[in-house]
Image: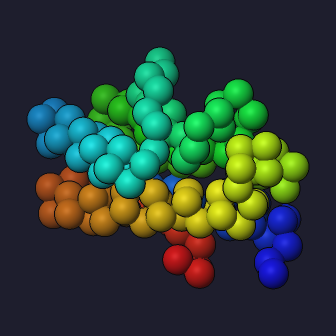
Amino acid sequence: MTGIQELRDRLAQIQLVASISGEPASRLYEEVLTELTSVGFIPSRRAEGHALFPCENADILGLPHIRLANFGTMISLWIRGPYDLSRDKAEMAGLTAEELYERILVGARRAAEVFERFRGIASSVLVSLPLDV
């Protein structure tokens, strides 16, 4: 079993950024949102974009989750609260910390696939995922 601190550190490594604007940026954003929703993430509007929760009550419990934002000339995805991953909080959501970690990784992988499809359109694309992905 992997230690909780290692799982937190791995979540903190997740970062996707595309330098892109206009209609392609909107399309990238919507495709990521659709992809994550299709694998069970629960979207919630935020000022900069969306929070995507891996399970019910993740927001109330303060669990790590995916953030997707549109900053005009940049679409960015990162993990909000990677160091908030805890066994107790995950269990309150009906999951183990490892299961919660895996759900977030599935979302990050799927989002990375979408970002990669836009590599030829965007000025630049950065995909940072943990080595075990």
Q: Where is residue 129 in the image (x, y as percent from the top left)?
A: 53, 68
> How many marks on residues?
0
Q: Residue shown at 20%/63% (left/top)?
A: 117
Say left or right for 96 vs 39.
right
Q: Is residue 110 visible?
A: yes
Q: Which residue lies furthest to the front in this view?
A: 94
Q: Residue shown at 47%/59% (left/top)?
A: 108
Residue 122's place in the image compared with 131, above or below, is above
Say left or right for 36 vs 132.
left
Q: Position of residue 83 (x, y in %)?
A: 79, 50
Q: Residue furthest top?
A: 47
Q: Quadrant of the N terminus?
A: bottom right
Residue 85's place in the image compared with 59, above or below, is below
Q: Which colour scheme is used?
A: rainbow
Say left or right for 21 vs 85.
left
Query: Of residues 16 and 44, which is closer to you in this image?
Result: 44
Residue 42's place in the image compared with 95, above or below, is above
Q: Position of residue 103 (x, y in %)?
A: 55, 60
Q: Residue shown at 30%/35% (left/top)?
A: 73
Q: In which quarter of the image is residue 70?
A: top left
Q: Is residue 81 visible?
A: no
Q: Residue shown at 54%/40% (left/top)?
A: 53
Residue 108's place in the image compared with 76, above or below, is below
Q: Position of residue 22 (x, y in %)?
A: 16, 33
